[in-house]
Image (tube, rainbow, N blue to C red):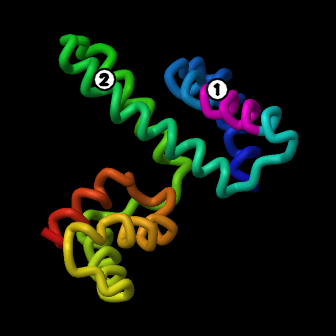
Amino acid sequence: MSLKDQLMDDLKTSMKNKDTIRKNAITMVRAAIKQKEVDERKEVTEEEIIEIISKQLKEKRLVINDFKKGGREDLVQLTNEEMKILLEYLPKQLTEEEVEKIVVDTIKEVNATTIKDIGLVMKAVMPKVKGKTDGNIVSDIVKKILS
């Protein structure tokens, strides 16, 4: 079953079960997919769907800090639940140790030695971890190792 079909089935199930949070999260993803299809006038691929979900997950991580600063624990909790739902549709997320191993191997591959080589390393690492971890985590690890 394709990811797009899975999202549709889960949307129907969440509507039947009156699971508003799941329904809203899936609807948001499906709207983004539809928007991309309309904009590009083509059917999206599985990789593009994963990209869309990853982007929405990243946006949620960013807004959570704003909610915490504003003292809106209700919105923090809601956003955390939506993030858990989005993670269900992404490939298994890498641990920090796994990301660090990939970064170390890539640094050896591209012969990076200083912090100035961060762009080169990031360019080589990101395709390897696409959809499996957040770019900020990768960036932090690269900076830590090259420093």
Q: Position of residue 134 (x, y in %)?
A: 38, 52
Q: Residue tagged by mark 2?
A: 77
Q: Earlier in the sequence, mark 1 or mark 2?
A: 1
Q: Is residue 38 visible?
A: yes
Q: Are marks 1 and 2 in contact (CB under 8 Å)?
A: no
Residue placed most toward the observer, 32 or 6: 32
- Characterize the magenta stretch by its predominant secondary structure: helix
Residue placed most toward the observer, 110 or 104: 110
Q: Quadrant of the C terminus?
A: bottom left
Q: Is residue 114 above or below residue 126?
A: below
Q: Secondary structure at mark 1?
A: helix
The circle drawn on residue 27 is: 1
Q: In the rendered image, which quarter is residue 38 located in?
A: top right
Residue neighbourhood size for the residue with mark 2, other residues' Cα within 10 Å, grouped as few (<14), some (14–19), many (≥20): few
Q: Is residue 15 left or right of residue 76?
A: right
Mark 1 → mark 2, Cα distance in angstroms: 19 Å
Q: Is residue 11 visible?
A: no
Residue, x 29% and y 58% (percent of image)? 139
Q: How many marks?
A: 2
Residue, x 30% and y 27% (percent of image)? 64
Q: Quadrant of the N terminus?
A: bottom right
Q: Position of residue 82 (x, y in %)?
A: 44, 30
Q: Position of residue 74 (x, y in %)?
A: 29, 14
Residue, x 27% and y 20% (percent of image)? 66
As for residue 43 lying within the magenta part, the answer is no
Residue placed most toward the observer, 113 or 13: 113
Magenta span: 28-36
The circle drawn on residue 11 is: none
Q: Secondary structure at mark 2?
A: helix
Callout 1 amino acid = Thr
